[in-house]
Image (cartoon, grey):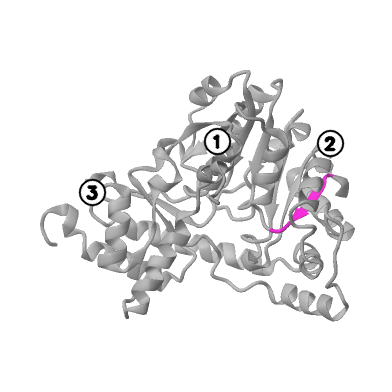
Amino acid sequence: MRLAERMNRLEIESAFDVLVKARALEAKGRSVVHLEIGEPDFPSPAHVIASAKRALDEGWTHYGPPQGLPDLREAIAAYISRTRGIAVSGKHVCVVPGGKPIIFFPMLALIEPGDEVIYPDPGFPIYRSMIQFLGAKGVPVPLVEERGFSFDLNILRDSLTPKTKMLILNSPENPTGGVIPADDVRAIAEMVRDRDLMVLSDEIYSRIYYTPDAPMSIASLPGMQEKTIILDGFSKTYAMTGWRLGYGVMPEWLVDGVNKLMVNSNSCAASFTQRAAIDALTGPQTDVDNMVEQFRLRRAAFCAALNEIPGFSCIPPAGAFYAFANVKRTGMASKDLADFLLEEAGVACLNGGSFGSHGEGYLRFSFANSIENLLEAAKRIRGVSEKWQGEKR
């Protein structure tokens, strides 16, 4: 027996590969500053943990509805209605184990072989992986550094064809930290409103932003709610990555398809985590606010330090917790430089090219680490910078 051919079309996340290499170095006694993994370094809120313990004691340890517990779906609907300015009810919500099923399930339900799917480049690798897996044609649209890593709207417009069945948006964005400006979101809505396609709006970093106003959801614009799938969850906002709990908000006709896929794959998300998620949404938000403020301080300190390294330049991200540094002036390929920094400086980061061809020439650093460690990482990188300077400093 051998793996089916379609398995060759699946990709993985390079962050986990780099983590394995970094752990191997640590096992040999090396010191490594971990800036590769995209998860908050904060504990889950204490009241959420207490809620999960209480739910276990109360017997929330059995199957729940595939679509999610009704109370949680209503809490999510109220939250989305308030934050996106749209009218949503629990019937529009699907609760799933993590955010990725809301990439996979709607695409599996909607996309046929040969369909075209537009996605951001550089972008989260799972977008491209799922497109390939389904036999569709991926159409990468570059994110432009000079526009704060937003789309070139002319290229996006020219990429739309009658075969385009889905447009993927991610704002705030992984890996760049870019936020699509509100005027651009409005322009994109004008481009697609009358087209026969769906928008997958990945808003998993929706609460982690550094701009005066919250990122705009395209679902909030006239005529777009019925054409949009909102992806959000608890991993990033509430530092609950290991709880594996996400959700999608979508038109009712698509909910049925996603529910079928849940029944055939996961049955349901864990009941006790769903009970805790209700308290995450409706309880105190102090932990979230404090976490974002810490990220804001780290962002300023780390980007300033990166900009002092020869060959590096880094615009402060508008959202998420990633610094996407331009390293083209080092003269080294992104992967070679990322490997070099791990081996020689003990700094684990990601090759921008692993996020798409337009990520070549960049490195992604997660600043979900202490300011002390971030500044230590920058110091270590500067210490080995003679590699691309040609002389020691």
Name the amino acid, label 2: Trp
In screen coordinates, is 240 left or right of 278? left
Point out the tag, 1 or 2, that comes first from the N-terminus: 1
The 10 Å Cα crowd at callout 2, few under 14, some 14 to 19, many 20 or more, is few
Alpha carbon distance from label 3 to label 1 = 28 Å
In screen coordinates, is 119 left or right of 387? right
| View extreme (front): residue | 1
Task: Estimate the x, y position of residue 264 in percent, counting from the top left.
Answer: 77, 51
Name the amino acid, label 1: Tyr
Alpha carbon distance from label 3 to label 2 = 51 Å
Residue carrying label 1: 119
Span colored in magenta:
92-97
Check residue 332 for magenta coloring. Answer: no
* One can see residue 357 in this view: yes
Image quadrant containing the C terminus: bottom left
Q: Secondary structure at mark 2?
A: helix
In screen coordinates, is 134 left or right of 328? right
Name the amino acid, label 3: Thr
Residue carrying label 2: 253
The 10 Å Cα crowd at callout 3, few under 14, some 14 to 19, many 20 or more, is some
Residue carrying label 3: 330
Query: Which residue is rendered at x = 59% and y = 19% of the image?
Result: 161
The 10 Å Cα crowd at callout 1, few under 14, some 14 to 19, many 20 or more, is many
| View extreme (left): residue | 391
Query: Which residue is rendered at x = 50% and y = 44% of the image?
Result: 8
Question: Which quadrant of the figure has residue 85?
Answer: top right
Alpha carbon distance from label 1 to label 2 = 24 Å
Check residue 93 for magenta coloring. Answer: yes
Q: Nearer the viewer, residue 63 or 144?
A: 63
Question: Which quadrant of the figure has residue 385?
Answer: bottom left
